[in-house]
C-alpha cells in the first residue's frame, strides 16, 4: 500500500533536519520556544493543518512567539515552514510508491487477508478498526489540504489567468476526462472561450496551431499517467501557453513542464486511487474565478439562465 501521509511527513521532517533543530531548541531555547518545540515534535504530522493562531491556542503562547520560532528555525514564517515540510513529504511519497493506481501483489493479498481473518465487521484479529475510519480521516485531511492549497500563490495565479485568458482549454485523458468536462462546463457559465479538449482528432490543433497569446491550458491527470498529458503539456509550454496541472501527490514530471502544479490527495485506503477530492479543488478554483471576474458576471449568468429557459426550461 502507498506510504501514509504521517509516515512521509515524519520522514520528511528527519530529512530536512527539522527534528534536529527542534530538539536543539529543547536544550538551548527559551521556555516559550521549548514549549512550542516540544509540541511540534509530538504533532509534526498535524503541522500542515495548523495556523499560528491555532498553535498558539493549543500551546497557550502568543502568535508572535510561534512566528519567532519559525524564523529561529530558518524560515520566514510558519507558512514557509509548512510548505517546506509538505514539499519534502511529497518527494518521500513519490519515491516510496509504485506507479499503479490500485492495490496489487502483496498489498492486495494483505488487504483481503485482513478482511477474511478479522472478526465481526471486518476488524482484524489485532483489534484495530481498519478501512472505514482511516478512509474518513484521510478524506477529511484531503479537504483541509484543498482549502490550504486554495490560499497558495500558485492557486491564486491560476485563478486570475482562468478569469482573464482569451481562451481556456481543459484536458483529461483517462478517468479524468469527466473531471475536465465538469470543470470546463462550470467555467463556461462564468466566461466565454472555454473548451473541453477533444481527444478524437489526435492533433490538438485548436490549442497548438491557434494564436497562443492569451490562451491557457489546464490538464487533470492522476497515475498511471497518460503519455498524452505529458506530450500536450510539453508542446503547449514550448508554444508559450501557460500550463496548470491538477494531479496527485506522486506526479514527478509535472513541475518541469507546468507553470502551476496543484496536488490533490487521492489515496484514501480504497482499492484504487480516488479522484473525488479533485472535484472539490475544481469547485474551489471555479469559485475563485467567479470572485476574480466580479459583479459584472451577473449579466452573463442571467442571460444563460434566460436562454436555458427558452430552449429547455426547468421542472417545477
Image (cartoon, rainbow, N blue to C red):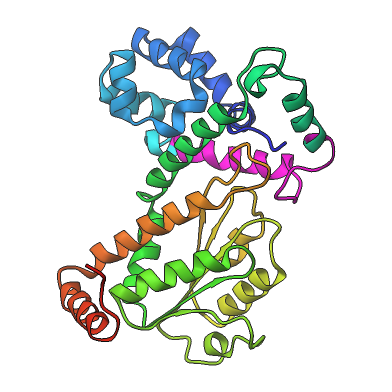
The foreground one among 267 and 54 is 267
Q: Range of the magenta residues?
A: 81-107
- Residue 75 position, x and y percent, is 43, 35
Residue 149, placed above or below residue 179 = above
Residue 85, placed above or below residue 168 = above
The foreground one among 20 and 105 is 105
Quadrant in the picture for residue 175: bottom right
Going 60% across and 72% down the picture, which residue do you hit? 233
- Residue 168 position, x and y percent, is 42, 78
Residue 31, placed above or below residue 195 = above
The secondary structure that most of the magenta stretch takes on is helix
80 in magenta: no
Outermost residue toward the right in this view: 105
Going 37% across and 83% down the picture, which residue do you hit? 193
The foreground one among 168 and 36 is 168
- Residue 173 position, x and y percent, is 62, 70
What is the quadrant of the C terminus in the image? bottom left
Left/right placement of residue 276 relative to residue 249 reads: left
Left/right placement of residue 279 relative to residue 187 reads: right
- Residue 304 position, x and y percent, is 24, 80
**Labels in figure, total:** 0
Amino acid at each position: 500500500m502507498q506510504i501514509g501521509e504521517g509516515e512521509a511527513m515524519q520522514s520528511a521532517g528527519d530529512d530536512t533536519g527539522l527534528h534536529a533543530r527542534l530538539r536543539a531548541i529543547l536544550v538551548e531555547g527559551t521556555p516559550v520556544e521549548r514549549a512550542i518545540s516540544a509540541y511540534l515534535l509530538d504533532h509534526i504530522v498535524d503541522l500542515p493543518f495548523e495556523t499560528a493562531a491555532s498553535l498558539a491556542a493549543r500551546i497557550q503562547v502568543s502568535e508572535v512567539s510561534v512566528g519567532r520560532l519559525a524564523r529561529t528555525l530558518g524560515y520566514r514564517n510558519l507558512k514557509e515552514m509548512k510548505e517546506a515540510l509538505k514539499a519534502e513529504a511529497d518527494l518521500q511519497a513519490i519515491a516510496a510508491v509504485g506507479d499503479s493506481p490500485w492495490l496489487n501483489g502483496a498489498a492486495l493479498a494483505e488487504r483481503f487477508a485482513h478482511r477474511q481473518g478479522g472478526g465481526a465487521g471486518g476488524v482484524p484479529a489485532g483489534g484495530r478498526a481498519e478501512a472505514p475510519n482511516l478512509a474518513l480521516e484521510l478524506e477529511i485531511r484531503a479537504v483541509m489540504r484543498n482549502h490550504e492549497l486554495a490560499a497558495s500563490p500558485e492557486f491564486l495565479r491560476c485563478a486570475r489567468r482562468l478569469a482573464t485568458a482569451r481562451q481556456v482549454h481543459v484536458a483529461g485523458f483517462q478517468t479524468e476526462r469527466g473531471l475536465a468536462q465538469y470543470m470546463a462546463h462550470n467555467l463556461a457559465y462564468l466566461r466565454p472561450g472555454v473548451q473541453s479538449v477533444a481527444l478524437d482528432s489526435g492533433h490538438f490543433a485548436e490549442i497548438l496551431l491557434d494564436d497562443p497569446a492569451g490562451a491557457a491550458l489546464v490538464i487533470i491527470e492522476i497515475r498511471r499517467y497518460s503519455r498524452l498529458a505529458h506530450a500536450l503539456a510539453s508542446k503547449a509550454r514550448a508554444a508559450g501557453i501557460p500550463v496548470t496541472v491538477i494531479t496527485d501527490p506522486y506526479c514527478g514530471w509535472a513541475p518541469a513542464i507546468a507553470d502551476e502544479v496543484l496536488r490533490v490527495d487521492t489515496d484514501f485506503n480504497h482499492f484504487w486511487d480516488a479522484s473525488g477530492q479533485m472535484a472539490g479543488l475544481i469547485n474551489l478554483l471555479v469559485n475563485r474565478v467567479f470572485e476574480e471576474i466580479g459583479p459584472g458576471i451577473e449579466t452573463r449568468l442571467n442571460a444563460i439562465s434566460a436562454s436555458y429557459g427558452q430552449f429547455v426550461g426547468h421542472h417545477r
